[in-house]
Structures are given as C-alpha cells and as structure tokens.
Image (cartoon, rainbow, N blue to C red):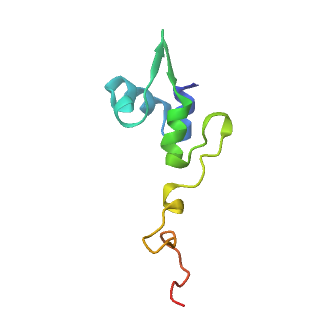
Amino acid sequence: MIDVPTAASVLGIGEWTAYAMIRRGDWQKDITPILRLGRKIKIPTAQLVALLYGRNAPGPAGEDPGPPPSATASSASGTTAPPPGDVRSTAS
C-alpha cells in the first residue's frame, strides 16, 4: 500500500489533482481501488503496478509472469507469427 502523493507522483499527476479525483470518485472508477483507514487514504500497490505495466506486471514476490499470450500463440500452420511492428522480412 502506498499513499496518495506517491501514487500521484508515479502516475505523473499532481497531488491535489489525485485528491480531487478521489473526492469526485473518478480515481476509484478510472485508476485503482482505494482503501480508507480513518483519515488516511492508501492505494493498493499491486493494482497500480498492473495499471502501469498491464499483463506483464511482476507477480507476487517478483515472480516472472512468463511470455505474453501473443508470444506463445501459433497459427494453424504451426508457425509463430512475428510480433507486431517486426521489421524483418517474412518472405524467403
């Protein structure tokens, strides 16, 4: 769990903007859940990391999530498709 100023810094937004988003309910709707502990507001780190890194976020204790699903998918011919944006020629 991290505090709001730290989460705001990680996301590249201002601290006041983050608190305003939480007050309006926009943070919970668009970014991550929040946890209110009395007057303190905490942001779950795992959800923030997942937001920043998507499916390739490290798992618990830094576990490697493995290759992304597109890297293990194969076509009907049994060959793997090159990743999007691959500049290598596929013609032989």
Q: Residue furthest top?
A: 38
Expressed as whole percent of the image width and height from the top left, the position of residue 89 reads: 53, 85
Task: Name the residue rendered at 54%, 91% in the picture.
Answer: 92
Residue 12 vertical position relative to residue 35 in the rendered view, above or below: below
Horizontal arrangement in the rendering, residue 22 relative to residue 55 (left or right): left
Task: Name the residue rendered at 36%, 23% in the picture.
Answer: 23
Expressed as whole percent of the image width and height from the top left, the position of residue 58 reads: 61, 42
Query: In terms of depth relative to the viewer, which is nearer, 30 or 12?
Result: 30
Expressed as whole percent of the image width and height from the top left, the position of residue 46 reads: 54, 33
Expressed as whole percent of the image width and height from the top left, the position of residue 86 reads: 53, 74
Quadrant in the picture for the N terminus: top right
Residue 9 vertical position relative to residue 81 in the rendered view, above or below: above
Residue 65 vertical position relative to residue 87 in the rendered view, above or below: above
Query: In terms of depth relative to the viewer, which is nearer, 73 or 6?
Result: 73
Query: In terms of depth relative to the viewer, which is nearer, 66 or 11?
Result: 66
Q: Residue furthest bottom?
A: 92
Q: Quadrant of residue 30?
A: top left
Task: Name the residue rendered at 47%, 69% in the picture.
Answer: 84
- The number of callouts visible is 0
Query: In terms of depth relative to the viewer, which is nearer, 79 or 63?
Result: 79
